[in-house]
Image: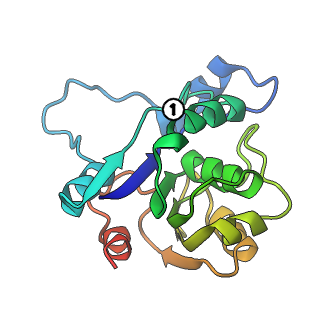
Amino acid sequence: MKQLFFVHGGDSLKAGEDFFTHWESDALWRVMDPFVKGLPHKKWKEDLFEKLGVDWVCAAPRFPNDMDAHYVQWKWWFEKHTPFMKDGVVLVGHSLGGNFLGKYLAENELPIRVGQLHLVAPAWGEGDFIMPVSLALIERQVSRTHIYHSSDDVVVPIAHGERFAAALPSAEFVRFLDRNHFFAQVEFPELLERLQR
């Protein structure tokens, strides 16, 4: 069975930044009426898991405090799951999840080889998820890396993805024009195709 481990996004506030001030002023994260019928609830992650089929086993645990995430807490939680990962595991991180995987793999060596790393609109150094100077360790322990970013992303500007691409010369950078932060799409065929290669 092929393994896929998904790390979702979130927000990490700067030191001393007030939680309520941040969230009350952030129009991108306004709360919508959850009781409205007909709102799409399925996202590309669920579609991806379904389409990969029976040859894959997919995990997407909820990471701690995603509205005010802290790297040490996410690292602790991730390391609770790494003993179950096998050689060739596929890691997918969206937004802050991409930031987390980039930082973690650049600073820590897993006891297994990562088959694929997929960073979807990854942030570069959000809050206390500060990226190290070198990402060379990622290139040594990951077989293939893919970075996906859209030039119209209003949450994490495409410059973040380009910075990852510059720091990971062997990575494939997939540029989109109209995916924003990959929130609205139900399918992600480009990612699915690369997983199934």
Image quadrant where residue 135 sits: bottom right
- Front in this rendered view, residue 32 or 146: 146
Asked whether, in this view, residue 110 is left or right of residue 181, the answer is: right
- Compared with 139, 54 (above or below) is above
Q: Amino acid at mark 1?
A: Phe
**Total label count?**
1
Residue 186 can be seen in this image? no
Question: Residue at the location (54% across, 43% down)?
Answer: 82
Colouring convention used in this rendered image of the protein? rainbow
Image quadrant where residue 154 sits: bottom right
Q: Position of residue 11 (x, y in %)?
A: 60, 36
Dot 1 lies on which element?
A: loop
- Compared with 40, 76 (above or below) is above
Asked whether, in this view, residue 75 is left or right of residue 190, the answer is: right
Q: Residues within 10 Å of mark 1 (few under 14, many from 20)?
A: some
- Compared with 128, 48 (above or below) is below
- Front in this rendered view, residue 19 or 138: 138
- Front in this rendered view, residue 183 or 94: 94
Q: Which residue is mark 1?
A: 63
Asked whether, in this view, residue 116 is left or right of residue 17, the answer is: left
- Compared with 88, 77 (above or below) is above
Asked whether, in this view, residue 38 is left or right of residue 133, the answer is: left
Q: Position of residue 25 (x, y in %)?
A: 61, 29
Q: Position of residue 121 (x, y in %)?
A: 54, 59
Question: Residue at the location (59% across, 46% down)?
Answer: 96
Q: Position of residue 183 (x, y in %)?
A: 39, 51
Quadrant showing the N terminus:
bottom left
